[in-house]
Image: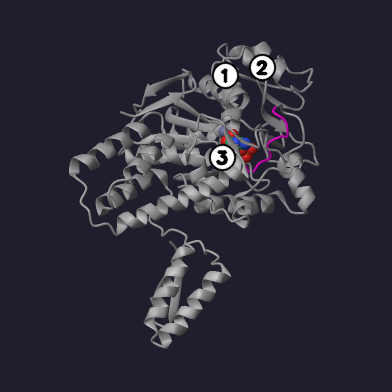
């Protein structure tokens, strides 16, 4: 029985989908620069939830948005538009910026074995849906117009703040809220902004030229593709206090009922115990890691070792450890692939049970990996290999690939002895050949004869 932790109730709850097909919405990236490894942790989390659902036999419709309309730089509705800033700095149109970074993001998804959700929805292609949404909210009395936009009136939505369990005063104290005399309440947020002439992305609307507020995107697109009530909504923990509160306010105000059954949030990745930030120069991308010799699968393995609700501290030592461990997994699997033992059916069933219990306990992948490691200690058997490949439907770690055979630098002394031995063999001096083999062994190497020479391996 699958249980998922619901941020709304702060509890693990039995998962019961609304309809046969599971419906899931995931907040996607803002495509104004390359996604960093913290962002990618969020999508590995989304992917593992999807994989667990599929492993448990559910059919799935997942939607992820691509924010290609600028979010504003701060949590409040002020600050500079990120897309506009990138566009100015890189001397490209916002559409070109969005295209470059959407493609880079999709490439990262593929490298990390992150399955693409069934629907990828670009914000710029759904402006009409957002406008209709805002019109409906205004008609229902939840929105009001000011000189610079349309705002959501949170005084009309008394349960505002129920996801983060922050009271409004705390929220206002915590957020840098725009000074705007026309707003009825400081925490009212923009549904639509009127655009000054120079604003780089703008669309026609009943309120003149403008652009959508950054929360309406997710309310409008989830409704369009998943309906007025869907099963799972994912995002990072940073979205809980503002973005998701505002999404809840908009959606519940419009529908008159709760629209999301399970809210799931992935914890943050830190670097060297602190915040990942451009100014500190510690925001790595998957490509950066690859250049440093860490494959995307090493990174995925690194992420999967920590439960999604725990903070994960990224260090290069940690990555080194993940690289060694991941390759050890592949090496052990290779042994099982060619194994000749038979593993009893009840033993296999027992491992499978433990694995299912782990993944069904709020997607406990670290525990499931523990089951895999224990299972690989069995005598080499193709049954174990097959079961590991089945588990890999959830891990997505490409466990069917061969291990990387690290080039071992053989000391010159050993090479010299091996060359002398080759010479002795050519002269059919078997006694000398055996003597040299023993000397090589003493230095910790095994020499194997090949057709035209030899191969050295560490003993
Ligand atoms: P953004 O493009 O800024 O909207 O972020 C995309 C996703 O990455 C969101 O779900 C964020 O919650 C998530 N995210 C941002 N920074 C981190 C981080 N350091 N660790 C984990 N997730 C993050
Ligand atoms: Zn969102």
Residue indicated by mark 1: 164
Categorize mark 3 by other alpha carbons within 10 Å: few (<14), some (14-19), many (20+).
Answer: many
Q: Of label 1 and label 2, which has the lower sequence position?
A: 1
Q: Residues within 10 Å of mark 1 (few under 14, many from 20)?
A: some
Secondary structure mostly seen in the magenta stretch: loop
| First to last magenta residue range | 64-75
Q: Give the left or right position of residue 21, taking residue 96 as reference.
A: left
Image quarter in which the C terminus is found: bottom left
Q: How many callouts does the rendering have? A: 3
Read off the residue under disc 3. 28
Query: Pointers 1 and 2 in contact (CB under 8 A)?
Result: yes
Question: Which is more toward the observer, 266 or 195?
Answer: 266
Residue 433 on image: x %, y %: 41, 78
Residue 410, labelled with which disc?
A: none
Labels 3 and 1: the sequence-earlier one: 3
Front one among 47 and 314: 314
Where residue 441 sits in the image (x, y, percent)? 44, 65
Secondary element under disc 3, as helix, strand or loop, is: loop
Q: Distance between the residues labelled 1 and 2?
A: 9 Å
Classify 10 Å Cα crowding around label 2: few (below 14), some (14-19), many (20 and above).
Answer: some
- Measured as percent of width and height from the top left, residue 309 is found at 51, 29
Rendered position, 292 above or below 225: below
| C-alpha gap between disc 3 and disc 1 | 20 Å
Residue annotated with mark 2? 171
Answer yes or no: is residue 20 visible.
Answer: no
Is the CB of mark 3 within 8 Å of ligand 1?
yes
């Amino acid at each position: 029985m699958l249980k998922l932790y619901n941020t709304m109730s702060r509890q693990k709850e039995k998962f019961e989908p609304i309809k046969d097909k599971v419906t899931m919405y995931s907040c996607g990236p803002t495509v104004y620069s390359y996604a960093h490894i913290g962002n990618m942790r969020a999508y590995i989390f989304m992917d593992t939830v999807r994989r667990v659902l599929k492993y448990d036999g559910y059919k799935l419709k997942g939607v992820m948005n691509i924010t290609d309309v600028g979010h504003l730089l701060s949590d409040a509705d002020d600050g500079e538009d990120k897309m506009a800033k990138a566009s100015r700095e890189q001397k490209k149109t916002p559409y070109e910026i969005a295209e470059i970074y959407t493609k880079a993001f999709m490439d990262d998804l593929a490298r990390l074995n992150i399955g693409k959700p069934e629907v990828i929805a670009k914000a710029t292609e759904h402006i009409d849906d957002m406008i209709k949404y805002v019109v409906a909210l205004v008609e229902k009395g939840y929105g009001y117009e000011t000189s610079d936009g349309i705002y959501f009136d949170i005084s009309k939505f008394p349960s505002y703040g129920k996801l983060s369990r922050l009271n409004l005063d705390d929220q206002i104290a915590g957020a840098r809220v725009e000074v705007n005399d026309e707003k009825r309440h400081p925490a009212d947020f923009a549904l639509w902004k009127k655009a000054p002439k120079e604003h780089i992305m703008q669309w026609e609307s009943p309120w003149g030229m403008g652009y959508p507020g950054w929360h309406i995107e997710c309310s409008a697109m989830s409704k369009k593709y998943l309906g007025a009530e869907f099963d799972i909504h994912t995002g990072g923990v940073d979205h809980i206090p503002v973005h998701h509160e505002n999404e809840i306010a908009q959606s519940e105000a419009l529908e008159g009922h709760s629209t999301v059954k399970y809210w799931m949030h992935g914890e943050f990745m830190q670097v060297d115990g602190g915040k990942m930030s451009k100014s500190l120069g510690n925001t790595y991308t998957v490509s950066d890691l690859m250049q440093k010799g860490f494959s995307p699968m090493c990174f995925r393995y690194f992420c999967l070792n920590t439960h999604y609700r725990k903070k994960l501290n990224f260090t290069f030592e940690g990555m080194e450890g993940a690289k060694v461990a991941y390759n050890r997994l592949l090496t052990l699997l290779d042994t099982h692939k060619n194994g000749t033992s038979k593993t009893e059916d009840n033993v296999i069933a027992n491992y499978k049970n433990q694995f299912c219990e782990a993944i069904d306990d709020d997607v406990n992948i670290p525990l499931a990996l523990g089951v895999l490691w224990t299972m690989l200690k069995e005598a080499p058997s193709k049954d174990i290999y097959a079961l590991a490949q089945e588990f890999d439907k959830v891990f997505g770690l490409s466990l069917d690939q061969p291990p990387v055979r690290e080039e071992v630098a053989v000391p010159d002394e050993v090479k010299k002895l091996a060359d002398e031995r080759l010479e002795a063999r050519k002269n059919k001096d078997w006694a000398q050949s055996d003597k040299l083999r023993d000397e090589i062994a003493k230095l910790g190497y095994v020499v194997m004869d090949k057709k035209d020479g030899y191969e050295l391996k560490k003993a």
